[in-house]
Image (tube, grey):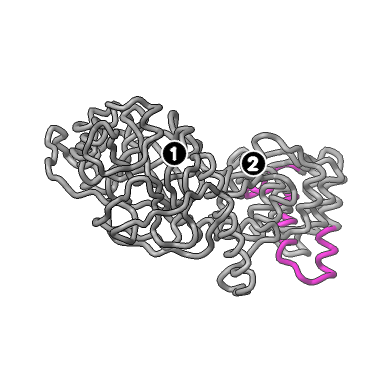
Amino acid sequence: MRHSLEQLETLVPQILGRGQINTPFDGYPILHSVFIELRDERDKTKHTRYIELINTILKYPGCNPDVLDKHRKPLLAYAAEQGKLTALKMLLKVDADPNLTSTQLQYTALEWAIRCNPASKAIPTLIKYTTKTSNILKNCQAMFDNALEEEDVDTINILVDLQLATYHPQFRNNLPALPPNVPTGFWMRTVTNPQKELKILLDREKLEDSILAKQRHTTTPDRNSYYTDYSPATYVRHSIPISIFGSHDAGLLIYPTNERIPYWFDGHREELTRDFHYHEGSNLNNGQRKGQLWEITPQQIQVTIEELYKKKISRHKKTVKEDGNEEEHRFDKHGIMLDKLLCEDVRFSWNEGLMRYKHKQIFGILVDPENEASCKKAFELKNILKLNVPFYDYREHPGTTHVVSAPELIQRWNLDISTTDKGLVKPLIMSNGHQLPKSKTINTVSHTMHGDRKMSNTRY
């Protein structure tokens, strides 16, 4: 029941005289009833009279400043969420408990203030009195995550300012942990023809690892020349969104080694062709002036990808700031929303390296669980190559890999995993020319590329 100011000025002395100061009437103790009228009062004179009533109640012997109403909330929670700073300070002065939670929703007054009015001047006052318990930090982190999703800049600012929530740049730390057996950086190769892949792997098994690592690619048919096929693969760095060919295909996940990679291209306008002949002893060259690296280690590739991705983020950050479109992009003062935007919009170009991997280096099968053809091909790979490894789904955004349940794929797509496709597809090889001239050896990783690359729709 609502009361006028005059009614309350008469009612308060009566209730105090009867000793019913903490007794709820119609679900609200007298302290709450006065505050209900205060929150809507804009007349300064009347506002002062409401404050005097609250002060009278709080100073009366036996008054419990933490008394709960029918919603199981103390008055401090209401004062906090509505930003009534004067009433809030009066409550704290008589030792209202700032750590008291609503038994229904389990939020302190500080949490109510942040949730309902993150710009409230009551928040800096409450933070001085509130104990940062693990439960509060957990709730505030959840509020932060929700604010980030909803682009609530005010809530992001206050939670970070008060150190009630933490944010790790998306580039490195706030992504799900890698599944067991998956390294931070690894090779990913989509496979069109499992039978052809099996033949390549069987040929490589005939060579010792030390000999295979030293072999140049050659078209010489003489087995004494240690003939072996190289295979183009994408290097994936966990937490960096990297494009791959055949996102709806199946393929192999391959452990990196310490051996040098004969050729790696960082995605600067790379072109593929099916018609290509190597010249024995020559360096591979696809005709581009940037982005080609020879005889480098996977560790050097990973560092190069990180540096290029950071530069791409930096360029986009500058562009977005210069754009100045406040209606489209409202950023917080900590740069968190900007970082989120960039990590959603910026990706690393697909890259390719020529691999000499063996069967033992394959630690997983790439599959897109949302694509039936990919799932069928994944089981085909597993059967033909006789692989006893998990299935993994790679998500380009945000650059994560997670395990996929084989039984769930079978049930979802009603797969007959005993059936395999015996068709052969001619493999692709990297280059934009049919003949490679003899070229000088280049052993450097210091040069990098800038700019976008051209992508073919071809699948290998």
Q: Position of residue 216 (x, y in %)?
A: 36, 40
Residue shown at 21% from the left, 39% from the top: 221
Query: Label 1 sits on what residue type?
Result: Phe
Residue occupying image coordinates x 66% and y 45%:
165
Measured as percent of width and height from the top left, residue 387 is found at 27, 29
Q: Write down the region rendered in magenta.
A: 22-51
Locate residue 389, reporting x and y percent: 32, 29
What residue appears at the point 56 percent right and 44 percent down from the top-left corner?
174
Q: Nearer the viewer, residue 22 or 134?
A: 134
Q: Which residue is mark 2?
A: 102
- Quarter occupied by residue 250: top left
- Tell me the crowding category of disc 1: few under 14, some 14 to 19, or many 20 or more residues within 10 angstroms, Cα based: many
- Image position of 177 with respect to 13: above or below: above
435 or 21, which lies in front?
Answer: 435
Which amino acid lies under the numbered mark 2 shown in the image of this protein? Answer: Ser
Tag 2: Cα neighbours inside 10 Å, few (<14), some, or many (≥20)? some
Name the residue that disc number 1 marks: 186
